[in-house]
């Protein structure tokens, strides 16, 4: 309805900034669930819904991010983080993309992703209350801990407002939890009515 308070983005780098806090830092063993309702008008290949860190094109300090990644004709739920250097291994990006996706257009979609840092098998995603599989790429599945620092959280863009990483559409009811929400709880957040 006209009184809805969803935020709209035009894909030009505009974003909302959320102050950094201990509650929004996730380290090894921490659990995260991110969910929202969205309308996707995006044309970018990796459009950010929300992310902590990676605020300029030169920064790679991605503690966590929920994005949509264009693959084929659909936009897939995409979770991204960067692991810390350990021993001989340098930092690396780790990205998980869902098998199912959503289409662009006027319809609203509910998406969610959950993960326990250090446990790559714990990741799961939901689209419209239905669980979907997926796979790790880039640095692959890892048990390494994530990069953690005091970077801000941005909603709707990343990498200095790069249009290729900026959201085009609308976002509503965005939530970040410090837990892996049970499947039935996430499913209950999707109610299309009668």
Image (spheres, rainbow, N blue to C red):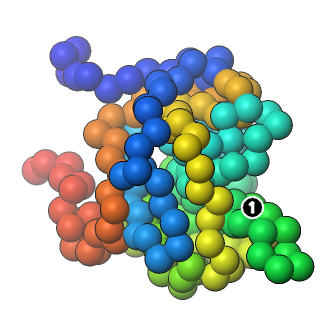
Residue drawn at 56 percent across, 79 percent down: 118
Asked whether 30 or 193 is in front, the reply is 30
Q: Residues within 10 Å of mark 1 (few under 14, many from 20)?
A: some
- Residue 171 in which image quadrant: top left
Task: Indicate the secondary structure of the residue bearing disc 1.
Answer: strand
Q: In this rendering, is residue 61 above or below 87?
A: above
Q: Quadrant of the N terminus?
A: top left
Q: Could one spot residue 35 in this view of the protein?
A: no
Which residue is identified by label 1?
A: 93
Q: In this rendering, is residue 85 above or below 60?
A: below
Asked whether 158 or 102 is in front, the reply is 158
Residue 27: percent from the left, percent from the top?
51, 66
Counting labels gives 1
Asked whether 137 or 148 is in front, the reply is 148
Q: In this rendering, is residue 88 above or below 5?
A: below
- Residue 144 in which image quadrant: bottom right
Residue drawn at 69 percent across, 49 percent down: 61
Residue drawn at 18 percent across, 52 percent down: 191
């Amino acid at each position: 309805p006209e009184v809805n308070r969803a935020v709209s983005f035009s894909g030009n780098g505009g974003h909302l900034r959320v102050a950094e806090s201990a509650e929004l830092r996730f380290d090894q063993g921490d659990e995260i669930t991110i969910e929202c309702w969205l309308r996707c008008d995006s044309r970018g290949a990796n459009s950010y819904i929300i992310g902590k860190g990676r605020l300029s094109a030169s920064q790679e300090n991605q503690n966590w991010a929920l994005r949509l990644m264009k693959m084929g004709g659909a936009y897939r739920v995409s979770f991204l983080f960067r692991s810390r250097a350990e021993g001989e291994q340098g930092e690396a990006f780790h990205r998980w993309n869902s098998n199912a996706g959503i289409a662009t257009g006027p319809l609203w979609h509910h998406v969610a992703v959950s993960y326990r840092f250090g446990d790559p098998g714990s990741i799961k995603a939901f689209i419209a209350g239905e669980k979907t599989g997926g796979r790790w790429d880039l640095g692959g599945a890892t048990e390494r801990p994530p990069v953690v620092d005091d970077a801000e959280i941005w909603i709707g863009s990343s990498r200095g407002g790069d249009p290729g990483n900026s959201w085009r559409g609308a976002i509503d009811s965005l939530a970040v939890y410090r837990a892996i929400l049970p499947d039935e709880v996430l499913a209950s957040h999707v109610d299309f009515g009668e």
